[in-house]
Image (spheres, rainbow, N blue to C red):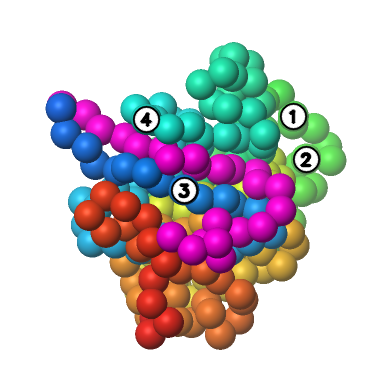
Amino acid sequence: MTEAAFGRGRAVIELKDAGYGYGGGTLLEEMNLRLTPGSFHFLTGPSGAGKTTLLKLCYADLTPTSGEVTLFDQPSHQMSRDDLAHARQRMGVVHQNCEFLDHLPITENVALPLTVSRRGGPGEDANLADLLGWVGLAGRKNALPPELSGGERQRAALARAVITDPDVILADEPTGNIDWEMSLRLLQLLVELNRMGKTILVATHDLSLIRAAKAQVSARVLRIAKGRLQLAGADL
């Protein structure tokens, strides 16, 4: 792993020789990564390589079985429950299988993080309307989740991830179940977030998406191979 893969300057999320294993086996080992403010990273690797596991280590859904994960300058294993909750409020996560509460309209689903953190109010209502417009869902705000297309669900998931204005966006295969045109639309939204200063980490198997992104933004591409993290080749 080269210095470029780690990034320079202060890290918002850092893995230091982090590993993860279960059932007596090792899935990831000696993971070293620095996500610095405003950086854009892609994470690639074959199915089952551990991309989702690495993302879960980044937002402290999993605890490393070796090494250390640091979130906003605090080692995750030393953080209290309140510390972890505060750190997670600074991270927006787009899961591979975006789940919603099917009985609530999409506008309420997107606003759930505000409801949970008790940050709702007139000003936030205006922000919510702007956000739905930004992701192209203003006309679908009253639709129920089962009524949305795959692309609409993914854009709603991204809106929900950024509603609290997080510093970091972690996305797990966000374009895995949508067509190419919608994939490019979602990519453009991520690029716009990065240009606003957000740190972006996207796990994907879609090399065409990575090539499209690199034409617009300076992005590092990392690959998990045989349980270790490495810089991908320049041919991507």
Please indicate, yes or no, whether residue 229 appears anywhere in the rendered image.
yes
Q: Secondary structure at mark 3?
A: strand
Q: Amino acid at mark 1?
A: Arg
Q: Nearer the viewer, mark 4 or mark 1?
A: 4
Residue beneath disc 3: 32
Checking the image for residue 119, the label placed there is: 1
Quadrant where the N terminus is found in the figure? bottom left
Residue 218 lies within the magenta run:
no
- Sequence-wise first label, 1 or 2: 1
Return the residue nearer the eye: 32 or 182. Answer: 32
Report the side of 146 relative to 157 (left or right): left
Report the side of 40 relative to 62 (left or right): right
- Sequence-wise first label, 4 or 2: 4
- Sequence-wise first label, 4 or 3: 3
Q: Amino acid at mark 2?
A: Glu
Residues at marks 3 and 1, CA–CA distance in whole angstroms: 35 Å
Q: What residue is rendered at 54% in x and 26% in y?
A: 76
Return the residue nearer the eye: 234 or 123. Answer: 234
Q: Magenta segment range?
A: 1-23
Q: Nearer the viewer, mark 3 or mark 1?
A: 3
Q: Nearer the viewer, mark 4 or mark 2?
A: 4
Residue beneath disc 4: 66
- Sequence-wise first label, 4 or 1: 4
Residues at marks 4 and 3, CA–CA distance in whole angstroms: 12 Å
Q: Nearer the viewer, mark 2 or mark 3?
A: 3
Q: Is residue 111 above or below residue 183?
A: above
Q: Secondary structure at mark 4?
A: strand
Residues at marks 1 and 2, CA–CA distance in whole angstroms: 7 Å
Please indicate, yes or no, whether residue 110 appears anywhere in the rendered image.
no
